[in-house]
Each structure stands twice: as C-alpha cells, then as structure tokens.
Image: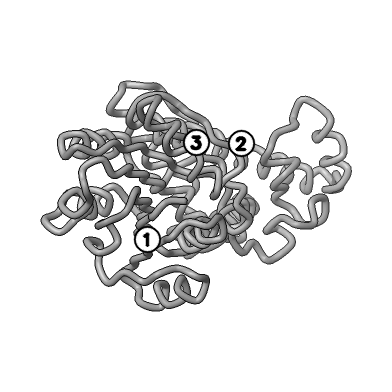
Amino acid sequence: MSAIGFIGLGNMGSHMAANLVKAGHEVKGFDVVTSNVDAFVSAGGVAASSISEASSSVDMVVTMLPAGKHVREVYTSAEGILASANPGTLLIDSSTIDVTSARAVAEAAQKSGMQMIDAPVSGGVGGAEAGTLTFMVGGGDETFEQARPVLEAMGKNIFHAGGAGNGQAAKICNNMILGISMIGVCEAFVLAEQLGLDHQKLFDISSTASGQCWSLTTYCPVPGPIPTTPANNGYKPGFSVGMMLKDLKLAQDAAQASNAATPLGAQAAAVYALFEAAGHADTDFSGIIKLLRGNA
C-alpha cells in the first residue's frame, strides 16, 4: 500500500480520497475548507495542515482542484507540491483544466525530478462515491502503469489517452459531445410536447432507433422514463450547468488555440451560458430543457 497526499477534498475529491483509504492506503488530506478536512478524518484519513505537509514524505500526490490557475498555484508556488515533495514522487492531477496548463505543470514536474499524469474524470459525485469513475489519462506509458492501481481504487474505467495533456483533451472533447447531445435530446422532447407526443412513447421509440444516445437512455431529461435521473428529483445535480459550461468553455478555448471548427460546441456553450445567467448554475445540466420550453 502507498502513502498518498490528497489535495482538494470537495464534492468529488472527498469521495475519491475516502475510497483510497478504503483500499488500504495511508492518505493525508488537505483542503482550504477546514470542515472538508474534518469530514475526511471522520472517514479514516489523516489531516494535513498545508499543501506542503500533504506533499512531503509520500509516494504520490493526487489533486482535485477547480481550475487551471489553482493547479498552477498548488504545484508551482514557493510552498507548493513541487517544492515540497521528494524527487521521484508520482503526481496525479484529476482536475478538469485547460490543456496548456496541464502540459506546463507536467513539464515543471519533470524538471523537478517527478513524473506526472493528468487524469480528469467522468461520472460525477455518484461515480466518485461508488468508486466507478472513468479516468482519462495523459502522460508517459510507465507513469500511467505506475498510477493505474491507485486510479483503479477510485474508478472503474481507466483509459490512457496519450502524452501529457491528452487526458484533458479527451475530457473536454467527451463533454462537448455530451453538452451538444443533451440539447438535442431536450429539443426533441420539447417538440414532442408541442406535437402531442407522449414522453414515454418518444423514449420507447428513440431509445431503440437512430436517436439513441447516452443523454436519452441513461440521463433522460424528462421525468418518468429513467427513474434515477435528476429530472425525477427537481433537476438537482448530478452534473451542474456551471460545470458543463466550464467544460464547454475549455473546449472552445482549445478549439480557438488549435484552429478547430466547433460550431455546435460554440452554440452549446452559448445556450448553457444563457441558462446560467438566468440563475441556474447549480441546476443539473439536463435542466436545459426548461430554457428551451421558455420557462427558465
């Protein structure tokens, strides 16, 4: 078993770190919110009072942070991970951030004598709690294999996407597909409502026809067909509008930087931005159907 430092014990990180404890690892956790650290200790973890303490004398460090600027700060500041961890420490960043930041921090880690992977996740809070997350990993082959056992303690599907930053690339591409497809499914249900077609009838037909997709058959945006979806719980997330918009903006930044044409991705970002501006940042992203109905 490994000694692990875990930085970022929020909605996702708290469950991920707890699963590492359940797997038998010795985990030191740090978060700027003291109550998050207290909850982690109650789950069997060890409290760290600083980034430096969480990063020192461990085999690896896992981070789960809000954005690229936080990742850069936590890793490269004077009292950050690269200044505190021993050479040879394995670094795993599971934040969802811009590709440029992921590659810059990985390069800085290598110069400090450490190997790093970017390993953003899909699966939401439920997947984090259940240990069924999907990890999309960027980094060297040997580093990926070294990290795999730890990732498997937190997730079910582990994919190596290529070199540094490619995990982030895979994540934003995947979520751009998700954001676009959810709008399409919601538009179809809104049209069906106007035409007098029952929700369940549309679901039964499209779920076995060419309209079948994850946004329909696993995360249906109307109450009824899939009882476990946020649509049956007042559109409580789940995966929030704010988080979806963050990922769509990251995709658009990457598209502009790489000169890739993503017109539907741009339009999806604009639609979710309107919904967020109407006060729905904390609504599940499938609640975009409300905006399309005109009652947001």
Cα distance between the residues tagged 1 and 3: 25 Å
Judge by depth and name the residue closer to the eye, 247 or 24: 24
Residue 208 visible somewhere in the drawing: yes
Examine the rendered structure and indicate whether residue 49 appears above or below residue 114. Answer: below
Residue at (72%, 41%) from the top-left corner? Answer: 216
Q: Type of residue at label 3? A: Met
Mark 1 or 3, nearer chain start: 1
- Residue 185 relative to residue 269: left or right: right
Reply above or below: 94 against 252: below
Q: Tag 3: Cα neighbours inside 10 Å, few (<14), some, or many (≥20)?
A: many
Helix, strand or loop status at disc 3: helix
Q: Residue 145 is drawn in which quadrant?
A: top left
Mark 1 lies on residue: 8
Q: Position of residue 223 (x, y in %)?
A: 77, 57
- Measured as percent of width and height from the top left, residue 237 is found at 59, 60
Asked whether disc 1 touches disc 3, contact meaning CB atoms under 8 Å apart, the reply is no
| Residue appearing at x 36%, y 55% in the figure | 66
| Secondary structure at numbered mark 2 | helix
Establish if 19 lies above or below 32: above
Distance from the alpha carbon under mark 1 to that under mark 2: 30 Å
Scheme of colours in the image:
one colour
Q: Distance between the residues labelled 3 and 2?
A: 8 Å
Task: Kindly identify which residue carries mark 2.
Answer: 181
Secondary structure at badge 1 equals loop
At label 1, counting other C-alpha atoms closer than 10 Å, the crowd grade (few under 14, some 14-19, many 20 or more) is many
Q: Which amino acid does the dot numbered 2 rest on?
A: Ser
